[in-house]
Amino acid sequence: GGWPMSVFLIPNGKPFFGGTYFPPVRSHNLPAFREVLEGVVRLWKEDRTRLISRSEELARSLQNRPATPSEIELTPELLAQATRTLIEDYDWQNGGWGSAPKFPQPMLIEFLLRRGSRGNESNLKIATHVLQAMAEGGMYDLLGGGFARYSVDPTWLIPHFEKMLYDNAQLALVYLHAHQLTANPVFRKVTEATLDFILREMTHPQGGFFSSLDADSEGEEGKFYLWTQEEIRSVLTDPQEAELFIAAFGVSEKGNFEGKNILRRVQDDRVLAERFDYSVDATADKLTSLQAQLLEVRSHRVRPATDDKVLVSWNSLMLTAFAEAGRMLEKQEYIDAAIKNANFILGNMLTEAMLLRSWREGTARHAAYLEDHAGLVLGLLSLYQADPDPTWYQEAIRLTQLMQEHFADPDGGFFDTRNDQESLLYRPKDLQDNALPSGNALAAMALLQLAAYEGRPDWRSQAERMLSTNLGMMLRYPSAFGQWLCALDYALSPVKEVAILGDPADPATQKLLKPLMTGYHPHLILAASPYPPPPGTPTLLHDRGLHKGTSTAYVCKDFVCQYPVNTPEELLAQLK
């Protein structure tokens, strides 16, 4: 899917004309593609000098980089200003931003959750409202877990059925964070169902995550996911159970999509319990069982095709999701999936000299972009907090050094491509977030976190300058700069640096780690290690001893630490 791009070049590679979609026959004031081709050929033969001159003008305009904007002081009021715009544009009826097609906007939701974690109730209300709306189904797959790319209507009902790895990674993470903030079991259920879907259907045996599932199967969009009442009753042979499912998920005879039904939750457990004379718990258990039965039947249908490329930037987002979910939900299988994924990327896509972007069928190729490096740094830092093997931290540092060496712009920030990559008309530097976070926004967040681990004011200053020069755009168009706003929130917040020293197998160490697995702590970094710390661990762990000869926690800010403590109660008191 997606839009075509037709660009016509002179022999030296410079463009003179281009466009996106041209129809097969002239329509809506657009020429037919054949007319475009014939026109280009005619002009090339009859007026070549003018075309070459035009290509030179286009090349010069592309190469003229805009001046770096002046720096703006970073203040908390900037966060409030961006939030006001997001609130004004919010769709309180259906949840989300915009009308149709409607995209889930996980970066904006994450920003609002960060604001909510510090007591901003209105921000938290918006974040949980849209998450609840999406969780009711339609765009969210209520049987198998996972999210489709977007909704073609404003109510989240009718999806474009394609499932993308990057959407599911970002959404699993925001649902996890919402659960940590609210303890809403629905949000935890969505997180787990989404990650379980990835493990079941989008994971290579060696640990890489596949890119996407197509929207169609057997030539029909959504066929794999749709149901009729008759099909439901044929699978759920107990009439009352069938009626319970039909009532819960709004399955009608006429359907809600081309004569069939996209499943969507329309009645909650309490209403159904009263209607069908079950307890609320029994209703929930029954529906879970019925969903599992239908999922089993659906698994025998012709599946949508899988795009089995492994892309570093997309995998890095999912690596972060599995690592955080494993740590916070205490699910070792998720941490194991994150470890396997990190080993896959580091073993198959990172050479001594460079990171490669894409892997398929045993071959890695294409020099990686900024988003791959910065995303992988963040993924490895998340994994290090879940599995404190210094290897993950060392590789994050190594990738940061590669990023600085090959992508840094002397005027601030980073280019999207390496300095030794294929020569283009100009080196792109895309600052805006799209379906994936901007590589520069990810890099800013990575530098801020590493500055806290290493005590590197130069890295923090570099990130702050990136934020400062992009503030104008962030404040004018906050909906297009969600990841930047998350980085700005991090930069403006006091970051708690937690160092824990002690034998990982010692119950005393495990008790100290426990408080860090509850609640949502977006402004906290964790480094844990046996004592003494082995080589390659963060500087945050260095020069700290065991208090009273047993497992010890330090809570620090800018490497200035409070009194060392030995109990989870003392640690919690310092964290508050």
Image: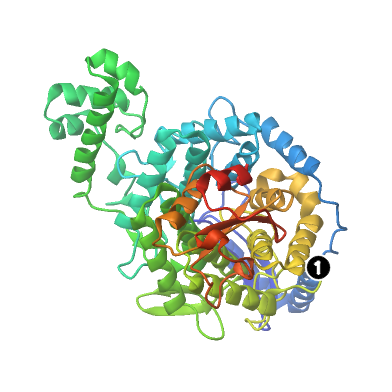
Seen at 54% across and 70% down, the residue is: 393
The kind of residue tagged 1 is: Arg
**Viewer-proximal residue, 290 or 450?**
450
* Residue 139: % across, % down: 42, 40
Q: Is residue 73 left or right of residue 10?
A: right
User: Is 533 located above or below residue 252 in the figure?
Assistant: below
Q: Is residue 140 visible?
A: no
> Which residue matches tag 1?
65
In what element is the residue under mark 1? loop
- Residue 375: quarter of image: bottom right
Nearer to me, 123 or 339: 339
Point out the residue furthest to the right here. 70
Q: Position of residue 94 (x, y in %)?
A: 53, 28
Kindly identify the residue that appears in the image at 31 percent across and 54 percent down. 304
Q: Quadrant of the C terminus?
A: top right
Q: Residue furthest left?
A: 237
Q: Residues within 10 Å of mark 1 (few under 14, many from 20)?
A: few
Position of 113 compared to 152: left or right? right
The residue under the point 44% across, 69% down is: 342
Q: Is residue 220 above or below residue 282?
A: below
